[in-house]
């Protein structure tokens, strides 16, 4: 009679079989990924940054060459009126003024004095006193008055001319300095406009270079994009599977099974034939119970 009893559990194994077409596609994706990863680095060999344009370079050059032109012109405009230079400049402006104003004025005064002297001589001749002492005195007085007027006239003209010459020198210096300043500003404004035009040209060129570079990037990454599409399609494709598992097996005690079978057989035999039937039923039931436990 064999001993032992209770439950004995076997190992449980679960296995899921993936469809063949999924396995094949996964293998192809892996090969593709390896090919992409093994590609050597390829540098972009074209220009990526737009250079300066001819208009920009012209504006830069003009600004560099004329940066000090305005201050230099302003300094030059102020030199003729600085220090002792003002006297020299004013004299240069005074001389033409005297030639144009003083000489004609003095000539007119001299002509008037000559007419007065002629009138004095005519009156003296009519009075019979021409050449006399009185005539000489009056002639001297007339000549002195004429000379005095000439001196006063000349002094007034020269004073007025000097003031005008100084004012003209200052005005000219200020005007020249203002012209130089305006010329400098106008030049810088023109250079700025030229630089702005060149900047717009540069931006247009830069946009083209950037577009070319992006197109190159897109061409280089097309394999990665294709791999991502293939991988996304693979992971999102639904598929079924087959699962196999082994469940625990419970084994009963042989002795207990035989005893239980004997009791059941005896009860059955007694119902069929009292006496002999009881013993025969017990024997048969015990045998069957023992065999069922193995």
Image (spheres, rainbow, N blue to C red):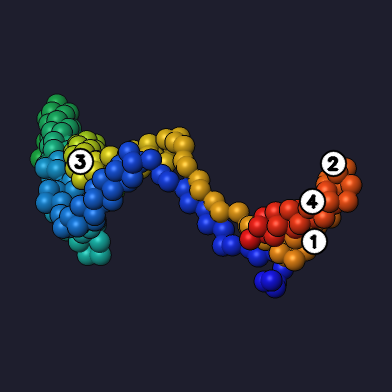
Q: CA distance from mark 4 to mark 2?
A: 9 Å
Residue 77 locus on image (x, y percent) = 21, 53
- Dots 3 and 2: beta carbons under 8 Å? no
Q: Which residue is mark 1?
A: 259
Sequence-first tag of 4 and 2: 2
Measured in 3D between alpha carbons, the distance from the residue under mark 4 to the one under mark 1, in whole angstroms, is 12 Å
State the residue at coordinates (13%, 38%).
Answer: 100
Query: Of marks 4 and 1, which one's residue comes earlier in the chain?
Result: 1
In which quadrant is the N terminus drawn?
bottom right
Disc 4 versus disc 1: nearer the observer: 4
Image location (x, y in percent) of residue 112: 17, 32
Instruction: For residue 161, say whether it is visible.
Output: no
Q: Name the residue located 15 percent from the left edge and 51 percent from the top edge.
A: 44
| Mark 2 Cα shell of 10 Å, populated few (<14), some (14-19), many (≥20) | few
Instruction: Work out which residue is located at the far top of the displayed protein and give it.
Output: 126
Q: Residue 156: x and y, percent?
A: 27, 46
Crowdedness of circle 1 by 10 Å Cα count: few (<14), some, many (20+)?
some
The answer to which of 212 and 237 lies nearer the viewer is: 237
Q: Which residue is mark 2?
A: 272
- Residue 151 on image: x %, y %: 22, 48
User: Is there a contact, CB below 8 Å, between mark 4 and mark 1?
Assistant: no
Specify the label residue 219 is tagged with: 3
Whole-number angstrom distance, CA of label 3 to CA of label 4 = 90 Å
Q: Secondary structure at mark 4?
A: helix
Q: Looking at the image, do the residues carrying marks 4 and 2 touch, with CB atoms under 8 Å apart? A: yes
Q: Earlier in the sequence, mark 3 or mark 2?
A: 3
Under tag 1, what secondary structure?
A: helix
């Amino acid at each position: 009679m064999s001993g032992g009893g209770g439950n004995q559990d076997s190992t449980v194994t679960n296995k899921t079989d993936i469809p063949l077409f999924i396995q094949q596609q996964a293998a192809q994706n892996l090969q593709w990924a390896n090919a992409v990863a093994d590609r050597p680095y390829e540098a972009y060999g074209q220009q990526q940054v737009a250079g300066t344009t001819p208009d920009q370079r012209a504006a830069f050059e003009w600004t560099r060459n004329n940066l000090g032109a305005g201050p230099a012109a302003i300094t030059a405009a102020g030199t003729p009126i600085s220090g002792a230079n003002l006297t020299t400049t004013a004299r240069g402006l005074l001389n033409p003024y005297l030639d144009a104003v003083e000489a004609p004025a003095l000539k007119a005064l001299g002509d008037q004095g000559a007419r007065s002297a002629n009138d004095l001589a005519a009156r003296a001749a009519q009075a019979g006193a021409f050449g006399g002492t009185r005539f000489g005195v009056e002639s001297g007085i007339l000549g002195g008055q004429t000379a005095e007027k000439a001196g006063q006239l000349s002094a007034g003209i020269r004073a007025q001319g000097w003031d005008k010459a100084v004012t003209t020198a200052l005005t000219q210096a200020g005007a020249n300095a203002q012209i130089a300043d305006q010329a400098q500003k106008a030049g810088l404004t023109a250079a700025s406009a030229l630089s702005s035009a060149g900047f717009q040209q540069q931006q247009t060129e830069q946009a083209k270079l950037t577009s070319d570079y992006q197109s190159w990037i897109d061409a280089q990454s097309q394999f990665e994009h294709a791999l991502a599409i293939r991988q996304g399609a693979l992971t999102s494709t639904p598929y079924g599977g087959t699962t196999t598992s082994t469940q625990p097996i419970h084994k009963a005690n042989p002795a207990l099974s035989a005893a239980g079978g004997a009791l059941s057989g005896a009860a059955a035999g007694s119902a069929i034939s009292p006496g002999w039937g009881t013993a025969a039923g017990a024997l048969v039931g015990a045998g069957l119970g023992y065999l069922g436990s193995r």
